[in-house]
Amino acid sequence: MSNMIIAGIGGQGVNKLSRIIAQLAVNHGRYCQYTVHKGGAQSLGIVYSELRFADTEITMLAAEIPAGKLDYLIALDPYEAIRHIKLANNNTQCWVDGKRPALFIERMPEFFNESTGNQSTGNNNSDDAMVYLQSLPVKLTEANYYQQALTRYQSAKMANFLAGYDCLRALGLQIDDEYQLLFKQSVKAAVL
Amino acid sequence: MDKLLADGNEAIAYAALDAQVNYVSHYPGSPVNRVVDVIACASRPRLPIINHALNEHIAALSAMGASVSGARSILVMKHVGLNIAADPLNYAGPLKIKGGLVIVVGTDPGARTSTGEEDVHWYAPQFNFPLLEPTSVQSIYDAVKKAFTISESIRLPVLVFISGRLAYQANLLKREAQSDRKKPLFKFNKNPADLINVGNSAVSNHQQHVLRLEKFARFNYGVQQKYNPKATLGVITRAASYALVCEVINDLALGSQVHLLNIEQTYPLNVESIFQFCHAKNDVIIIEDQDGFLETMIKRDLFGRVDCQIRGKTVFPPWGELRYQQVLVFFTELFDLAIADKAIAVDRTAPPRPGTFCEGCPHRSSFFAIDQALKEADGIIGGDIGCSSLPPHRTDWLLCMNAGVGMSQGIAQISPQQKLVSTGGEGSLFHGGLVALLSAVENEVNMVHILFDNRAVAMTGHQASPTTSGRVDVMSLLLSIGVKQVFKVNAFAATEVEKAINDAHRLTGVKVVWVTGDCALQVNAESARRMRERTLTIEPSLCGDCQLCYESLQCPAINRINIASRQLTIDMDACRRCGACVHICPNDAIKVSDPLYKPKVKTEVANV
């Protein structure tokens, strides 16, 4: 039994990546249940999904991952990593898009400064969030998926693909072709 | 057939298809917004007839029409939609329907995708319809399919409630092989005894209705018992709380000390089976979210028959979504256990992300214009449901459909000295806002309504609205109901929108500022061309540092270049090339590289 959270903001492809990872798990004989949490916002709101994997089918499994039982965290935004990191334990593996500019929330200092401890207004980088994450006892992989996606695919929308790829490789799943194929099928403009 | 990965929305759709449904009627609403899209995209030779109704009231009535003509029908809406469908559904019981009629309602404990977490369970005893509440993706499929046969056997509509948690949950689903039914021929047969519901026949139809429902109370659908039947502590769950409670009991290894009963048929209850479960217990805890419907029904039905203590809402609150932690704390305190928590210590919280408009959204520029037009007068902005309400504090209220034009009428009549605009999308206008507008005309109210026309019901996944096809001539329609003047404005030309609002306020009567601009998430040939051929840049030497585009327009694609600087830049990956920023820039500092771009757009004004 293992648990994963994929976190991001509306428009980054959390829902799609969750579906693809779950589908891969199922294709390879694993059991997977996932629940997407999306708010009222189509774009730039909080979106995350809770994936739960097991070797055999479990009939009744809660949607929610209990505190301390998070094994993997993919965050397409550093602040979204902070939102879920309280569920992590000392062995949790995290892949965080660390250089994502703070998107939109930096314009709301009343929320932003209070929760991030950031005193300057209009801070549009997320270094402080990464510094905090680095101080926590988790296995953190920081990558610049946002910039990589822009360079390789001319679209930041592919950051979810790259983050998912890193995660699958670390899990020891050699299913690159299958993963790419599932992505291709779900991406309207075939950028791959 | 192998199991496939499906979410709650898909499970509902597959069940309807596999039950050979003939008629699908809906008004889109999260969390069951995708059901009809999945049905419509199914690859099968004969699709059911799909009725994209303009509101839930009409959706319910048309499904009732199909059902009395013998067609298997499904009616899909969200919890607050049930309020609007409630009027006709009160007649669907006495009606003695023919084809199975299943009403799937998406509920929303926690109000993640709604303006309220209203508990609609109380409609079940009001309508006197059976109510099923599945607990997983598979049980959603099974319950919706079963509901058709139940509905046909007792000739009553069957309610199936799906909570937001389950609607967006995906799991393995086993579909049963479809039996090929021949396409039946449907015919409406006149039947005044059942269909003319007045006076004596209303009373006798009501009697028949109640007796048919009593027949169903002998059913015992979807009962699961787990753990130790000899335990003196009983726990009763429904819907999403079943899995939650199972997991807590497993995690705490309390299986030997608890007897658990999950009920999927929550109305009417099978009283005998619940009595059998409760009578040998000392203590029964009912764990459910929302108002405690199951607790109330169990206490009503077992009144005076059992000695055990039955608790529910005194333990778990009626608000919010039930969380793992709440259930865990309850059981650890009850059994005096310690919680072994391996979670790391975290002392920071993440900032909230209140909704905003997408990049390129026509509403962004419209709201900029509204703010500009009203800022001197500290005016009132009436809010309605839809994408226009995504940033929650841009309007002065955010309640139900048609609250924009509807509440504004009352305020305009009682406080005419205040400058007011009501807002609402075209989805809202055709949902019921048109009647509200006509009502304002008939009552000679002075008010300005801003109609956001983005040519789609965008928030629930771009279902078609009447302006998508362009069949409705909005201008003639508004003028024909007596609107004094209609200003048709391009949403992305904020200064024009502002001017139209100010002009409209100078006139008496009901005026409409019809703001047009396609949803930015709709990709068409023109938007694809713009994305390909248009580039926007902010020329630093011309920028006057007014920060209007960054702070007031609040386009997420416009960012500061770094922490220290106030210099702005446009992220061309996020930008949708709508040109709203170009329009509002007082210094012409935003340059567009597109020969086809025309910055000034003429407003069309029409009156009778």
Image (cartoon, helix red, strand yellow):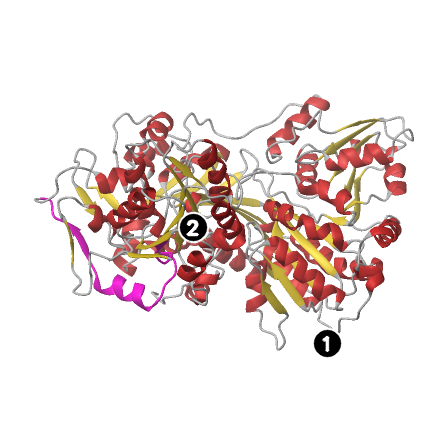
Picture quadrant of residue B556: top left
Measuring from the top left, give residue B464's x and y in whole percent.
Answer: 48, 62
In this rendering, the label closer to the viewer, 1 or 2 = 1
Quadrant occupied by the C terminus of chain B: bottom left
Residue type, numbered disc 2:
Cys
| Residue B600 x, y percent position in the rendering | 20, 56
B429 w.r.t. B112: above or below = below
The residue segment tinted magenta is: B515-540
* Residue B203, placed above or below residue A188: above
| Amino acid on which disc 1 is placed | Asp
Q: Mark on residue B3?
A: none
In the visual, does B126 lie left or right of B515?
right
Q: Which residue is mark 2?
A: A167
Of residues B247 and B450, which is closer to you in this image? Answer: B450
- From where the camera sits, is residue B222 visible? yes
Q: Residue at x 87, y 42 (%)?
A: B273
